[in-house]
Amino acid sequence: MIRRALIIYCDNTYSGKLPGPIKDEENYTKFLTSYLGGEWYAGEIRSLNNPTKLRIDETIQKFLNGADYTFIIFSGHGCINQLDNNLQYFEVADGNISIRKLITDAKRQTIIADSCRGFEKFISEEMTKAILETKMFSAGSSTRNLFNSEVLNAEAGLSILYSSSEDQSAVDSENGGVYLLSLLAIAKEWGNRYGNEFSIDLKTVHNLAIGYLNQNFNTIQVPVIEPEKRTKYFPFAVKNKRLI
């Protein structure tokens, strides 16, 4: 299975500097390459710091498209554009891009957005979408194979997780966005527990992270996951039977 991850972290755009995105990139790069995160290879992960819209588009075309599963994280400023069907937009170096621009051609994909979701009205130009195939190497280790298997066992489609509900801000911190930190905390707690479950899916981690967020951070943001008529969600974390 070909997998690709993209971490877009915008700590210095026109709405002001943020302390958390840089830490978010560090945290999730470390997590993805760990046993718990599914042993992603370093070559399967790309990080973009304060990129332009064109740079993101080029990266998706050349690096992500053609993959069987894509996993994208955005950390930074954002809003809901009322002039574009209340679609989520993200603030990058040269303006705003819609969440549509982060959708790849993969049959299985996840987007996690840690940004504000206040309502705004603005015109944003749409950029042309292209598809480029990329050769990749295959899997090799146990938790890696387990992650691949769990992705392929889930229905094809797009899962989207938001750090807050509509018309809410998302809290940032020196250690990263508090929603992204909560997801990692839940995964790590699960990874350290004994049991017969060897994977934990996106929806489960998301729901547990809401409770962790309320208990550990001073925020009233309510993370949401886009409703899907699916029976099995993509994995967020896996663990090797031998590690239990």
Image (cartoon, rainbow, N blue to C red):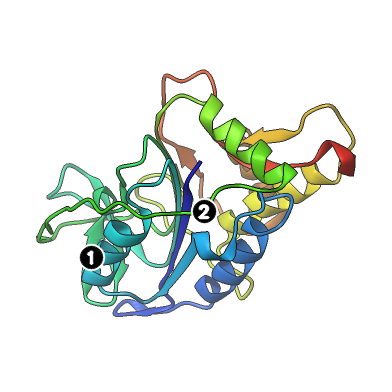
Q: Is residue 106 left or right of residue 37?
A: left
Q: In which quarter of the image is residue 219?
A: bottom right
Q: Where is residue 90 in the image (x, y as percent from the top left)?
A: 31, 61
Q: Residue 96 carries which label?
A: 1
Q: Is residue 96 left or right of residue 189?
A: left
Q: Which residue is drawn at 53% across and 67% down?
A: 172
Residue at x 58% of width, y 65% of height: 42
The answer to whether residue 189 is above or below residue 175 is: above
Which amino acid lies under the numbered mark 1 shown in the image of this protein?
Answer: Asn
Percent across and percent down for residue 189 are: 80, 47
Numbered circles on residues, count = 2
* Residues packed near mark 1 inside 10 Å, few (<14), some (14 to 19) or many (20 plus): many
Q: Which residue is drawn at 25% across and 62% down?
A: 57
Near-viewer residue (109 or 222): 109
* Mark 1 or mark 2, earlier in chain: 1
Asked whether, in this view, residue 34 is left or right of residue 72, the answer is right
Q: Name the residue under label 2.
A: 137
